[in-house]
């Protein structure tokens, strides 16, 4: 058993004025998308490895990766206008990567401090070392390098923001860019070869999380109209045409717009007024003045899967104009015709 002469604990920090790691997310309505991170359940992982060059790591022969957990339990996101959203935070792990050649020996290095338990996850995947735990921890192996080199080349962090979506919604804050930051400890154990002294070093990476918040939602949809076609007869041509209009109001916070899908009560894709007793039918069309493509339904057929309207704002008002062109005597049976149309309104995210 090796005699431990003494231990030296070194705390070395990178500059606090610059953010080494920036993570971008976009919250739109009830969805979140991460630009440079991946998710596994509630856990968020940086997808971009961070270089250790800024840490000026000491060259060593033997070292052991460690997870030194940030003690924060919440983050506060602040917009440029001063709006604030506080949400739960938990630092759950770290991953190291080295290109150095090494052998692995059993037993970790704890610098004689016994600062934490063994990590719940402590994986060596051929140069990648993944450490996860509910608290600060170490691993049960030591890396023995072939020569004195810096211990690792890259690292990336794992954390959780489990209530981010709910907290932004409950805070009722305006759209904008929101920023929060935390200090990520990057720690490892090492052995000073000259005197066989076990120690550890901790560096700090300032991580900034940027959220582009667009609180899109539909709170209500109101349609005004009776659905009765106003008929116009041409006695000379013995024909009839008709139209009926609905005034539509969509309220909420809409960004970047809405989309509508339509279903007919008969054949879903056949938009026709059907005779209540006979087999006759009258195809109709639908014009939406504010839609990207004004002619939504033509001669009983919808041209696209959705009708789309672009808007950034709180209220959207527009007209849906249903009509049919001249129908001549003898082409269809006399009587009552009807159709029931289901319209599904969605945010066009």
Image (spheres, rainbow, N blue to C red):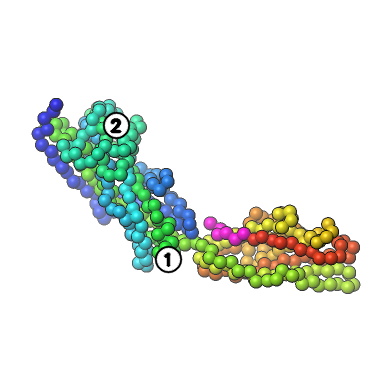
Query: Element at badge 2?
Result: loop
- Relative to 263, say whether 81 is above or below: below
Residue 100 badge: 2
Q: Residue furthest left?
A: 5
| Left or right position of 314 against 343 | left
Which residue corresponds to mark 1?
172
Give how far across and how far down residue 106 sits, in percent: 25, 28
For residue 95, which quarter of the picture? top left
Q: Nearer the viewer, mark 2 or mark 1?
A: 1
Q: Residue at x 90, y 63 (%)?
A: 330
Q: Residue 197: where, in percent of width, then height? A: 14, 34
**What's the residue at 19%, 39% (across, down)?**
114
Work out whether 80 lies above or below 181.
below
Q: Is residue 96 left or right of residue 113?
A: right
* Res. 165 image quadrant: bottom left
Side (left or right) of 112 relative to 32: left
Q: Does 230 appear in magenta?
A: no
Q: Which residues are magenta?
A: 344-349
Say few, some or many: other residues with alpha carbon within 10 Å of mark 1 (under 14 / 14 to 19 / 20 or more).
few
**Mark pair 2, 1: CA separation:** 50 Å
Looking at the magenta stretch, what is its main secondary structure? strand
């Amino acid at each position: 058993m090796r005699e431990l002469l003494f231990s030296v604990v070194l705390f070395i920090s990178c500059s606090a004025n610059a953010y080494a790691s920036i993570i971008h997310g976009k919250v739109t309505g009830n969805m979140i998308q991460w630009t440079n991170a991946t998710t596994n359940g509630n856990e968020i992982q940086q997808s971009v490895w961070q270089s250790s060059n800024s840490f000026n790591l000491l060259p060593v022969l033997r070292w052991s990766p460690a997870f030194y957990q940030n003690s924060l339990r919440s983050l506060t996101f602040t917009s440029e206008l001063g709006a604030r959203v506080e949400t739960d935070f938990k630092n759950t792990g770290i991953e190291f990567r080295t290109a150095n050649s090494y052998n692995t020996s059993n037993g970790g290095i704890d610098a004689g401090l016994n600062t934490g338990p063994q990590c719940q996850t402590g994986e060596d995947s051929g140069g990648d070392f993944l450490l996860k735990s509910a608290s600060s921890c170490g691993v049960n192996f030591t890396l023995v390098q072939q020569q004195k080199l810096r211990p690792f080349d890259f690292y990336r962090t794992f954390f959780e923001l489990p209530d981010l979506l709910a907290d932004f919604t409950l805070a009722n804050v305006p759209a904008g860019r929101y920023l929060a930051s935390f200090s990520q400890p990057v720690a490892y154990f090492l052995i000073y070869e000259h005197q066989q002294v076990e120690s550890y070093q901790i560096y700090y990476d300032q991580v900034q999380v940027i959220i582009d918040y667009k609180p899109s939602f539909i709170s209500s949809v109101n349609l005004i109209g009776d659905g009765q076609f106003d008929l116009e007869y041409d006695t000379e041509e013995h024909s009839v045409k008709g139209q009926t209009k609905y005034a539509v109001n969509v309220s909420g916070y809409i960004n970047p717009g809405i989309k509508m899908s339509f279903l007919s009560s008969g054949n879903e894709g056949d938009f026709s007024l059907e005779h209540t007793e006979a087999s006759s039918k009258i195809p109709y069309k639908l014009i939406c003045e504010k839609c990207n493509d004004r002619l939504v339904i033509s001669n009983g057929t919808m041209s696209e899967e959705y009708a789309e309207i672009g808007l950034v704002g709180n209220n959207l008002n527009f007209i849906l104009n249903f009509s049919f062109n001249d129908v001549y005597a003898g082409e269809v049976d006399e009587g009552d015709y009807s159709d029931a149309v289901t319209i599904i309104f969605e945010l066009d995210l």
